[in-house]
Structures are given as C-alpha cells and as structure tokens.
Amino acid sequence: MGNVIKGIGSGLANLTGFGSLYNPVGDAEKKVASATLDLNEMVAQASLLGLQAEQKEIQALGKVVESNKQELESAMSENEEVIWEKMTETNYFLLLVALLVVIIVVYLVLQKN
C-alpha cells in the first residue's frame, strides 16, 4: 500500500511541476547504473585477457617461425626454382606453338599464290 501512495504522490507532484523534488525510482536507477558499470568492467577485463592470450599465441608463432627460418627459406627457394623451371617449359611450348602457327600461315599463303 505504501508503494501505491508513493506512486500517486509522485504523479501528483509531476502534474503540478514539483516532480523533480522526489524521484521514486532513485535507488533503482543507482543500482542499475552500478550493475551496468560492473558489467562493463567485467567485459573490458575479459576482452583484455582475450587479447593478452592472443598476443601470447602470436609471439609463440613468431618464435616457431624464427626457429624454422632456415627450413622455410630453403623450401621457398626450392619452390621458386620449380616455378621458374615450369615457366621456362611453358615458354618453350608456347614458342613452339607460335612457330608452328607461323609455318602453317606461310604455307597457306604460298599455296594461294
């Protein structure tokens, strides 16, 4: 019954322009603001912990890459050699095809004459 009377009193105060003198939800607003602040702090801490764990993983990966640097570089150079060999073979094949096309075109031109 006390809450009903407080609610009616707050409504009448708002109607008459004195609503700012009494705030019936003042405690609730403070509790919600405090809970929101606590939640935001908890989310920020969890995010920070996640980022720190990710940074540790990145550092560990960097150490693995650094320790295997020689092997990685040798594998890359071998791959480059294979790629260049295949490109050379492809260029020779294309040169041969172009030469055959030229020979056929010259043959056809000479046949018409």
Image: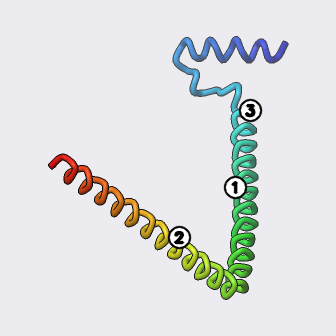
Would residue 71 be found to the left or right of residue 18 on screen?
right
Would residue 59 be found to the left or right of residue 101 on screen?
right
Structural crowding at the residue carrying mark 2, measured as other residues with C-alpha within 10 Å and reported as few (<14), some (14–19) or many (≥20): few
Counting residues from the start of the chain, the first of labels 1 and 3 encountered is 3
Residue that mark 2 sits on: 86
Q: Nearer the viewer, residue 47 or 75?
A: 75
The image position of residue 35, as x and y in percent, is 75, 42
Q: How is the image coloured?
A: rainbow
Callout 2 secondary element: helix
Three-letter code, disc 2: Lys
> Who's the residue at 18% across and 46% down the image?
112
Structural crowding at the residue carrying mark 1, measured as other residues with C-alpha within 10 Å and reported as few (<14), some (14–19) or many (≥20): few
Callout 3 secondary element: helix
* Residue 12 lies in quadrant: top right
Where is 111 relative to 48, above or below? above
Residue that mark 3 sits on: 28
Counting residues from the start of the chain, the first of labels 2 and 3 encountered is 3
Q: Which of 106 and 74 is in front in this view?
A: 106
- Mark 1 to mark 3 CA distance (whole Å): 24 Å
Three-letter code, disc 1: Ala
Structural crowding at the residue carrying mark 3, measured as other residues with C-alpha within 10 Å and reported as few (<14), some (14–19) or many (≥20): few
Three-letter code, disc 3: Ala
> Who's the residue at 54% across and 13% down the image?
16
Q: How many marks?
A: 3
Q: Which mark is residue 44?
A: 1
Q: Nearer the viewer, mark 2 or mark 3?
A: 2
> Who's the residue at 69% across and 71% down the image?
58
> Who's the residue at 74% across and 32% down the image?
28
Callout 1 secondary element: helix
Where is 91 relative to 30, above or below? below
Quadrant in which the N terminus is drawn: top right
Q: Which of 88 and 2 is in front in this view?
A: 88
